[in-house]
Amino acid sequence: MKESLPPRNRIRVLPIVLLAAAFSAVVPADTFSWSNETSVATNANLPRDEIAPTVSAKLLAEVTIASRMLRRPIASARWDDDTVVVANQRSGTVSFVSVDEMAVRREVEVGGNLSDLACVQVEGKPHLLLTDDKAHRLFCVRVTDEAATMVWQLEMPTGPTSLVLSPDNHSCVVASSWARTLTWVELPAAVGDSAKIRESLDLPFSPKAQFLFADQKRLLVADAFGPRLALIATDTRTLLSIREIPGNNIRGLTRNQGGDKLYVTHELINEIAPPRSSEIIWGSMVSDAMREIPVATILDPEASLSQGSRFLALGNNTRGAGDPNGLASRSDGRLIVAIGGLGQIGVVEPGGIGVTRLQTGKRPTHVLAWSDNRFLITNQNSDSLSRVDFDWKENTNVDVIGTDDSEFGGADETPADYEDSADRTSYSEKGEAEYEYAGVDESFDESRSGEEGESSEGSDGYDQEKTETEYDVEAAYDVENQYAETEYDDREAYASDVSRNGLTYQTKTYQIGPDADKGAKQLVATVQQMSLGLPPKLTPSERGETLFFDASLSRGGWYSCHSCHTDGHTSGSLADTLSDGGEGAPKRILSLHGVGQTGPWAWIGDKSEIESQVRQTLRLTMQGRKLNGGEIGDLVAFLKSLPPAPTFRPASDDADAKIVDAGRELFQSLDCIACHSGSVLTSEDTYEVGLTDERGTTQFNPPSLRGVGHLHSLFHDLRAADLNAVVTQYKHQLPRDLTLDEQEALIRYLQSL
């Protein structure tokens, strides 16, 4: 790598024409051009149903790993036989890491807020494809030994979050969550050719995870927040079906090695289970799971997704697996699942019965299968990468507890002698590593201890004095019940924990699954973790972000704040959180985007300070690890930093703008502003609006209408399917009947917010 690189040259953020409505037009190929000069898009005169390409060739700056920055790795891809490239969301950099040596070889600043990446070959030379969900673009970077160059970029619909490549690398599909759009892009076949947007397809939900069935020319697209799965024909680019699974937060899609099953990671919120300790600890309130679905069922658009499917619990019997994320499969039928909320991966036994947990960094999100015995994990909230290596070793020193599966996870009994035999169930290899019962550490104490708060108890009974490694005594659970019928005890040995050049390197080794007979082969996994760079001093909101995704804040580690408020938005589910004074009246989970400006808080508006709402949620709903005053302040700072959701459907042209204006005038003349007023479209009071919950409550605080079009079901109980139902079916608080044109205008105005 040459030292004489140009000074840091940040990517110019170009003017962006965004479309959050339908993108259904095919863009003519002759609207695209290639230039080796840096160009600025002039999109002002473009029709709103077209997206302009911006093509430039510019050198990008190199970054030293000694640079202190918040990286937040979010995705990874194979660059060559020994190099993985990692997309760092927050720093807008990509790290090139030697997989064998676990060392950062290079880091390049590409700019933006990265959301996904892929590696493509152009004329036999590797290039990077990246999505940026802040500047709303897809762009390409060519990397050589001498320099990194951005060669082209295309503006995308609002919020591009994932991309999937065609097998021949000639095209890709970009999913834009906020715009609810899939965009097909033709990729250059040669250096100097242009990338072209071929077609777009709008969806009735926000897409995120994608899985391509290349041979069948089908694409499965998962809902970013809720339970929906769309099946797309990639040859005709048409929507074949939208079906649902019971769940939310769909984060991982992978196929088994045999190719006949697809595994989907998700959570499931039970609206009728309030946060009693028993409902939480046994996973009744929130379940952490995978769903196994036959591929034949998925590819049949008429089939129910429950046909032949299985629900596989990742968390069970008092031990949650909060926020399951990405996953990958092994040829022996085992699955590797990132458990984001607890900083672990779960190794799921063949058939789904039995899970061994391995510790990684904070919030593992992405699992990359490097080979059948090697997997790479990106740990988003600790700026680290974990390598997991599997190997079969002869078990030379194991006192076997039992010889059949029932004693290690059978359906009928729990091994009562786990605890008693803990000190004798060990595995050793030439005396160098010892695998012993390590107990359960649900505290996950990598999180910040927080600044000192007052040593006093808040008025709500939430003790500020506790540190992050302490638990409420009531939240402690019986050690004898830790290991459910379907979970093996963790046996680990710390081989090393060192620091090189200020970066942390840690190695741990684990026994996988039940004990093998003495002399038989035992599967063992070694986890090596490395920092991607030096960390900065975190701001309060950055520390609060880590807490937001930390499932140890809930009793048993079953869920985090993110589990219900997905990525700060909402899962769209109902939940009974006791926030309205009692149980039995589940409410729609509200989006937290812009929440710092929309007080008072809760559906009944009884919290005038957001900190009071946070304390009540921690005490009544979460019931896990207690936070001190500094940590609570950090969590509040993060919530206040969340911006409002982007506009759902801005006016597309002058005629549409007139309809929006007419709807705005109706909104005012019909006195909708009595409840939804000002720039945040809410108010501080509670009102009787003709609705009653199960506990007889009739007065509610109006939620903000900013970005209301992004929501699927409305009112406190989800009774209205969409904005159209609010206006036409329920005629919510309308003083008179509206004409069809007035209904259209009012709905269109609400969609424009």
Image (cartoon, grey):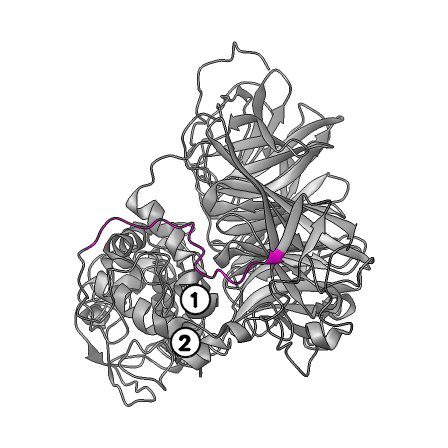
Q: Which residue is mark 2?
A: 575
Answer yes or no: is residue 646 visible.
Answer: no
**Could you say where residue 205 lies in the image, as x and y percent from the top left?**
52, 63
**Residue 673 occupies quadrant:** bottom left
Could you tell me how far apart the alpha carbons at marks 1 and 2 are, in whole angstroms? 8 Å
Residue at figure coordinates x 24%, y 60% from the top left: 465
Residue 715, percent from left and from top = 36, 76
Q: Residue 682 falls in which quadrant of the image?
A: bottom left
Q: Is residue 330 above or below residue 504?
A: below
- How many residues crowd around disc 2 within 10 Å: few (fewer than 14), some, or many (20 or more)? many
Q: Are marks 1 and 2 in contact (CB under 8 Å)?
A: yes
Q: Residue 457: x and y, percent? A: 19, 66
Q: Can residue 649 be spotted in the picture?
A: yes
Query: Farthest residue toward the top?
Result: 4
Image point (32%, 86%), residue name? 693
Residue beneath disc 1: 564
Prevailing secondary structure class for the magenta stretch in the rendered image: loop
In this view, the residue in front, 25 or 495, is 495
Of mark 1 and mark 2, the one earlier in the sequence is 1
Say which residue appears at 76% left-offset and 59% top-offset.
256
Quarter holding the C terminus is: bottom left
Whether 365 is drawn above or below 124: the answer is below
Please name whichever residue, 654 or 419, is drawn nearer the observer in this view of the structure. Answer: 419
Point out the stretch of residues depicted in magenta. Answer: 436-453
The quadrant in which the N terminus is found is: top right
Q: Is residue 637 left or right of residue 369?
A: left
Tell me where residue 194 appears, x and y as whole percent.
64, 30
**Side (left or right) of 743 relative to 109:** left
Residue 635 in which image quadrant: bottom left
For the image, the number of numbered tags is 2
Element marked by disc 2: strand
Dot 2 amino acid type: Ala
